[in-house]
Amino acid sequence: MNRKIVSLTIALLASLAPYVAAGPTGDFVPEQMVCKVMPGYSVDSINQQYGTSVTRYLSHISAYLLETQPGQNAESLAAVIATDPQVVYCSANYLLDAPEAVQSSQPFLDAVPSTDPMTQTAATTLQLSSTQSVTTGDGVLVGVIDAGINLAHPTLQPAATSGYDFIANDSSAIDEEGGRGSGHGTFVAGVINLVAPDAHLIAYRVLDTTGRGDGFMIADALLTAVDQGCKVINLSIVMSGKHDVLDEAIEFARNQNVMVIAAAGNDSSEVELFPALDSYVLAVAAVDSLDQKSLYSNYHGKIDICAPGDSVYAPYLDSAYAWWDGTSFAAPFVAATAALIYAIKPTATWEEVRDALLNTTVNIDSQNPAYVGKLGQGRLDPLAAVQFIQQTCCVGTTGNLDGVGTVDLSDLSLLIAYITMSNVRPTCRAEWNLNSQGAIDLTDLSIMIAYVTGSLSQLPLCP
């Protein structure tokens, strides 16, 4: 096998890096702020008082990109503006990075592909061949918000198209060569294609060749992906703290039943990076071939699920393949499985997709005794997840949450635990969603209480 490290010199990287400013929270775009004002309050008053001007506006979430006066420190000014009671938030336009670019993880190039990707350890562990006998993701759009995709790669050419290049402001979201972030988006897309070969991948380029991009741009790309019909969006990017506009964009996507998947990061620590820490994404940590936490992977209580991240083999630049390690490549295994779920049930809600992914994981606590409770629900099991969504689990009346057959205090306790955010997941959402409308919430709880206490003689029928 022809495997060599893709070498990039420090001098070259430095010459390619964009000019950024640094503050206590992180690097940001000089002279740019992201702000949102209360309803009925005009951003014009901010511009008049502080000499700022509007550069962009995201109507979905009513967020502004403002430009300061030349030379003015955006982070300091934003902190002042944020104290205005009519302002929802205001902060510098912080930058996010591909974890592998930050950690200097490098791919091993296989210039002449010599391995069938379906025979790699990750593919056999996840039983991808068996899973694809059930579904291949046909008809589902997946947004790859990253460094672009090599659309000419023989493997990806029929599956991927360009959405938009937010770096170059044109319609050609091509993964460009020449930096430590090059190939990252193509590799992520390749992993998704490996799992869901008939899903359609749409490239949104938000990271330059150094692997960096600003949060407002990424939020814009995410909202565009939602508008263009993507049901799954992969974000293999990280930052410390939180980017307010991207946080709102992620919540908007979740409310449209779009599943956003994020990489946990490669610091090998309990640091909670954004967007993985966001409650509206599924945060993915990486495990090795033995289902042990990968040496580099972050771990903490906000991780939702794990997936293979070591020695992943996928398309790279030109017509090559490469081997690469990172949580960036664990995340797309989960994103692609979400696409498989949507292919089986296009009307699935966000909660149904999440439950199918998390309720079917392989327990890996015994392999990771030092990380119990810090690696989410376990390791991804695509075959079990797609079988889960196929089940017709609710028969007769609703309310039999524990599967015993009678509806009693045990079922009521489970419902209370779920609503109060305990670590309880429904095995059959139709059984738990007693009113068959929207989320499982206090309305369902009131129905359950009424039945258990005898004031309701019969529970609602299954949908």
Image (cartoon, helix red, strand yellow):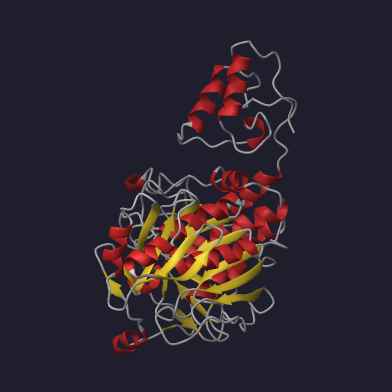
Compared with residue 28, is residue 351 higher up or lower down, i.e. above or below?
Answer: above
Question: Percent from the top left, x then y, of residue 277?
Answer: 41, 52
Question: Percent from the top left, x then y, of residue 412?
Answer: 55, 22
Q: Is residue 303 left or right of residue 318?
A: left
In the foreground, 258 or 159: 258
| Total tally of numbered discs in the picture | 0
In the foreground, 393 or 19: 19
Q: Residue furthest left?
A: 24
Image quarter of residue 291: bottom left
Image quarter of residue 337: bottom right
Q: Is residue 184 left or right of residue 388?
A: left
Question: Percent from the top left, x then y, of residue 316?
Answer: 53, 80
Can the viewer see residue 406 in this picture?
A: yes
Q: Is residue 115 left or right of residue 241?
A: right
Compared with residue 356, is residue 33 higher up or lower down, i.e. above or below?
Answer: below
Q: Is residue 172 left or right of residue 139?
A: left
**Residue at image point 60% right, 46% down:** 356
| Quarter of the figure that contains the C terminus | top right
Question: Percent from the top left, x then y, of residue 417?
Answer: 48, 29
In the foreground, 231 or 8: 231
**Residue at image point 57% right, 25% down:** 445
Compared with residue 10, is residue 204 higher up or lower down, i.e. above or below?
Answer: above
**Residue at image point 61% right, 82% down:** 153
Can the viewer see residue 124 in this picture?
A: no
Compared with residue 237, is residue 244 higher up or lower down, i.e. above or below?
Answer: above
Image quarter of residue 447: top right
